[in-house]
């Protein structure tokens, strides 16, 4: 079968590889729709971010290697021994980070806290291929009301569900969200469903602000036109937001906000409030911790998403409570378009993309 393999950073080739077989606890699937995550798209070009060192080591020691492809919708073709609950024809999506199954956490029903297991696309081959073998424990069945394209967003949505849960949002909290890319828009919708009061979003792209208003922001501020921090403070009676999600930081070369939106998030949150760091910065960030200490700020990071989070995303999207379609801006057709999807996703600003670019794997 055909699979995209990395021969080095920026060197992606559609190679012939052996047909994978479903072993015990595994499911053989045909990927229907796949999107590179923003992290994967940056790593593909060797841009430092989450897991850079791990990917670099694998390329140096194992290339060519099948990497990435954990955000997908796939159809089950066959199940291996011991797999229950999945049948040929079922559509599935997955969570990327899996429990190891053997550590003391996993053996005491606290596997959701385990960080020792494999990650799909990083330790296990993902779905940029004609077929893939995945651990059944990673999968969730996709409801018929969810399209293939929406299902490919469920993994990212489950991370956003985990981010909002980590935030410990209280009913009527004033919430500000810096960055209205896919995760910013997801946090917006989940915060709204979770009882947020006033919701203020910030982006520098007018099209992202427009989608943000459509998906329920009370105020979607364009930071190119106004002082976002001053406006958040003004809209919250001068005290700042109870809760701020920082979803815009990252490499300015990729059109992201650098460290600036983290400083803005800290300036926009009220004393005693919480900043939830969703972004990856790709390197150390200079931060005045005394300022956080003085103002009793909580700087939190989202927990990893669990099976329960992923199952919840299926309910949210199937029932129409979270809308993903307005965020899907670029859809490509055919497995040959995978490199183009990486290019668009690594440069979302330049391509005016909101969600990562999706690839419908079979030519239509
Ligand atoms: Zn474990």
Image (cartoon, grey):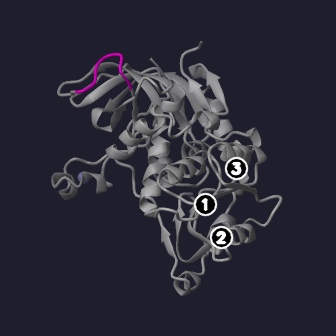
Q: Which residue is disc 1 drawn over? A: 198
Q: Which residue is disc 3 drawn over? A: 254
Whichever of labels 1 and 3 marks the residue nearer the N terminus, that label is 1
Numbered disc total: 3
x 57%, y 28%: residue: 13
Whether the residues at callouts 1 and 3 have beta carbons within 8 Å, the answer is: no
x 58%, y 55%: residue: 48
Q: Is residue 188 left or right of residue 95?
A: right
The local secondary structure at tag 2 comes to loop
Q: Judge whether residue 347 can be spotted in this image.
A: no
| Magenta span of residues | 85-91
The local secondary structure at tag 3 comes to helix
Q: Is residue 326 left or right of residue 97?
A: right
Camera-side residue of 337 and 308? 308
Task: Give the Cα distance between marks 1 and 3.
Answer: 30 Å
Q: Which quadrant: the N terminus?
A: top left
Whether the residues at callouts 2 and 1 have beta carbons within 8 Å, the answer is: yes
- Under 8 Å from ligand 1: the CB of mark 3? no
The residue furthest top is: 364
Return the x and y of residue 316 as percentages of the image width and height. 45, 39
Whichever of labels 2 and 1 marks the residue nearer the N terminus, that label is 1
Residue 62 within the segment the image draws in magenta: no
Binning the other alpha carbons within 10 Å of mark 3 as few (below 14), some (14 to 19) or many (20 upward) gives some
Name which quarter of the figure residue 214 lies in.
Answer: top right
Question: Closer to us: mark 1 or mark 3?
Answer: 1
Binning the other alpha carbons within 10 Å of mark 1 as few (below 14), some (14 to 19) or many (20 upward) gives some
Camera-side residue of 291 and 80? 291
Q: Judge whether residue 256 can be spotted in this image.
A: yes
Question: Closer to us: mark 2 or mark 3?
Answer: 2
Return the x and y of residue 66 as percentages of the image width and height. 46, 33
Q: Is residue 342 left or right of residue 150?
A: right
Q: Which residue is disc 2 drawn over? A: 236
């Amino acid at each position: 079968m055909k699979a995209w393999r990395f021969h080095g950073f920026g060197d992606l080739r559609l190679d012939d590889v052996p047909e994978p077989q479903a072993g015990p606890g595994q499911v053989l699937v045909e990927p229907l729709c796949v999107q590179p995550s923003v992290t994967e798209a940056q790593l593909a070009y060797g841009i430092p971010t989450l897991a850079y060192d791990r990917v670099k080591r694998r390329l140096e020691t194992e290339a060519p290697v099948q990497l990435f492809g954990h955000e997908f919708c796939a159809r089950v073709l066959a199940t291996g021994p011991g797999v229950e609950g999945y049948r040929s024809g079922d559509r599935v999506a997955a969570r990327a980070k899996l429990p190891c199954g053997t550590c003391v956490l996993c053996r005491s029903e606290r596997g959701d806290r385990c960080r020792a297991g494999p990650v799909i696309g990083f330790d296990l081959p993902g779905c940029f291929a004609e077929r893939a073998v995945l651990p059944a424990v990673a999968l969730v069945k996709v409801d018929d009301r969810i399209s293939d394209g929406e299902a490919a967003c469920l993994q990212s949505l489950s991370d956003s569900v985990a981010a909002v849960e980590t935030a410990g949002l209280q009913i009527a909290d004033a919430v500000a969200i810096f960055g209205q890319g896919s995760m910013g828009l997801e946090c917006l919708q989940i915060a709204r469903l979770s009882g947020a009061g006033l919701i203020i979003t910030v982006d520098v792209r007018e099209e992202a602000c427009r989608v943000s208003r459509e998906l329920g922001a009370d105020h979607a501020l364009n930071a190119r036109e106004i002082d976002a921090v001053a406006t958040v403070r003004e809209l919250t009676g001068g005290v700042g937001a109870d809760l701020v999600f920082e979803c815009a930081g990252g490499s300015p070369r990729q059109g992201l906000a650098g460290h600036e939106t983290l400083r803005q998030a800290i300036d926009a949150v009220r004393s005693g409030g919480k900043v939830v760091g969703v972004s990856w910065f790709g390197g150390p960030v200079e931060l005045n911790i005394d300022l956080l200490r003085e103002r009793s700020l909580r700087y939190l990071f989202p927990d990893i998403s669990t099976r329960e989070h992923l199952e919840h995303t299926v309910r949210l999207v199937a029932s129409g409570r979270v809308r993903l379609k307005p965020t899907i801006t670029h859809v490509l057709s055919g497995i040959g378009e995978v490199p183009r999807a990486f290019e668009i996703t690594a440069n979302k600003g330049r391509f005016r993309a909101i969600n990562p670019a999706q690839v419908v794997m079979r030519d239509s």
